[in-house]
């Protein structure tokens, strides 16, 4: 190979168009170039590679073995170049940077991934980092200053609250779930007395989720001492699997069970006394003005709930 020869980006683009068109003439029309210019691009590429890239079959051009091998590399070069240009162009976006979001499990696992995906599609210069944990873990991260936004199911202590802005995010609906063949499936008139017979699968004692659920059930005049707790499990996923296996009924966030209901793995029922749930809050630090990207993502979260 002669080292004074060079391969250019335009030669690779021209090669791809010719390979697709099967003709110098059609490629020239597509590229708004003269046919001799297109031919010269391909010839220069062949000289650089010391390989013939096309053969003629009648009036059509067909790729040689070397042309086929080059095709995949050329396509990858074009894709990488387009990605590079988009990445560099994004540096001019005032929204560029990272937004660090912390969320309790139900929101972080079942709600935010789709919202983050839509947000980053609309704003590719912003990267959203999501941290998922229990209420205590996310609160600790917030207080340590490692989060731009935190989604919590609790109001933080008054002594700390003056350092943060708090917005109502949503009321997270709860769902009573039963095995698919359970006689309560689809009912909306389950009474408190009905809950005292079957096994109830609960979160572990001491967890924030357990305490919040017990407070809601008490508000619905359910006597907690009369519930027959069949199992205590450490996650919503475990409760869903246990209910689907016929081990009892359970209470979980409604957002966590949409897929299982659609697939017929579990069914929903409802209390006669009405819906239950818990209030969620968004917290953002006040010590500095919010960066535009953080403000926009917070507004996106707030706007995503009705």
Image: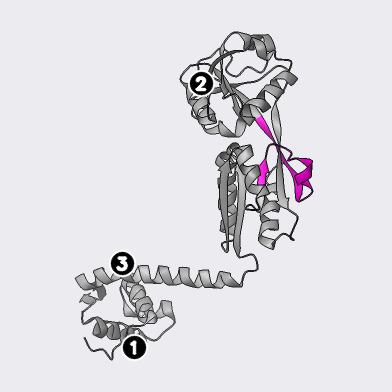
Residue in the image at 65% along x and 20% along y: 270
Dot label at residue 72: 3
Residue 170 location in percent, x, y?
A: 71, 39
Residue in the image at 69% along x and 62% along y: 292
Residue in the image at 49% along x and 27% along y: 238
Residue 169 location in percent, x, y?
A: 71, 42
- Classify mark 2: residues with Cα within 10 Å, few (<14), some (14-19) or many (20+): many
| Quadrant of residue 96 within the rendered picture | bottom right
Dot label at residue 238: none
Task: Give the residue at mark 2.
Answer: 243
**Badges 1 and 3: C-beta atoms under 8 Å apart?**
no
Residue 106 location in percent, x, y?
A: 59, 36
Magenta-span inclusion, residue 181: no
The CA distance from mark 1 to mark 3 is 25 Å
Count of numbered badges drawn on the protein: 3
Sooner in the amino-acid sequence: mark 3 or mark 2: 3
Sooner in the amino-acid sequence: mark 1 or mark 3: 1
In this picture, which residue range is highlighted in magenta? 150-173
Of helix, strand and loop, which one carries label 2?
helix
Examine the rendering and report whether any part of residue 278 can be seen. Answer: yes
């Amino acid at each position: 190979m002669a080292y004074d020869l060079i391969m250019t980006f335009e030669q690779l683009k021209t090669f791809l168009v010719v390979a697709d068109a099967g003709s110098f003439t059609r490629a020239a029309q597509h590229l708004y170039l003269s046919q001799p210019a297109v031919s010269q691009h391909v010839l220069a590429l062949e000289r650089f590679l010391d390989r013939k890239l096309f053969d003629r079959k009648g009036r059509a051009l067909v790729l040689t073995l070397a042309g086929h091998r080059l095709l995949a590399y050329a396509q990858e070069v074009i894709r990488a170049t387009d990605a590079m240009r988009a990445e560099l162009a994004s540096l001019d976006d005032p929204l560029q940077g990272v937004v660090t979001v912390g969320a309790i499990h139900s929101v972080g696992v079942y709600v935010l991934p789709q919202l983050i995906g839509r947000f980053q599609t609309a704003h590719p210069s912003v990267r959203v980092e999501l941290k998922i944990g229990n209420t205590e873990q996310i609160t600790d991260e917030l207080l340590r200053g490692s989060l731009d936004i935190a989604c919590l199911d609790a109001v933080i202590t008054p002594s700390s609250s003056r350092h943060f802005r708090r917005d109502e995010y949503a009321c997270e609906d709860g769902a009573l779930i039963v095995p698919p063949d359970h006689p309560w499936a689809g009912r909306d008139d389950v009474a408190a007395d009905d809950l005292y017979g079957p096994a109830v699968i609960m979160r572990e004692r001491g967890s924030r989720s357990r305490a919040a659920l017990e407070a809601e059930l008490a508000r619905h005049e359910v006597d907690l001492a009369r519930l027959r707790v069949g199992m205590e499990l450490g996650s919503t996923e475990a409760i869903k699997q246990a209910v689907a296996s016929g081990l009892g009924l359970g209470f979980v966030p409604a957002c966590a069970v949409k897929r299982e209901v659609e697939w017929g793995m579990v069914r929903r029922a409802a209390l006669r006394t009405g819906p239950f749930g818990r209030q969620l809050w968004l917290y953002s630090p006040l010590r500095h003005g919010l960066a535009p990207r953080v403000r926009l993502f917070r507004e996106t979260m707030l706007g995503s709930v009705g």
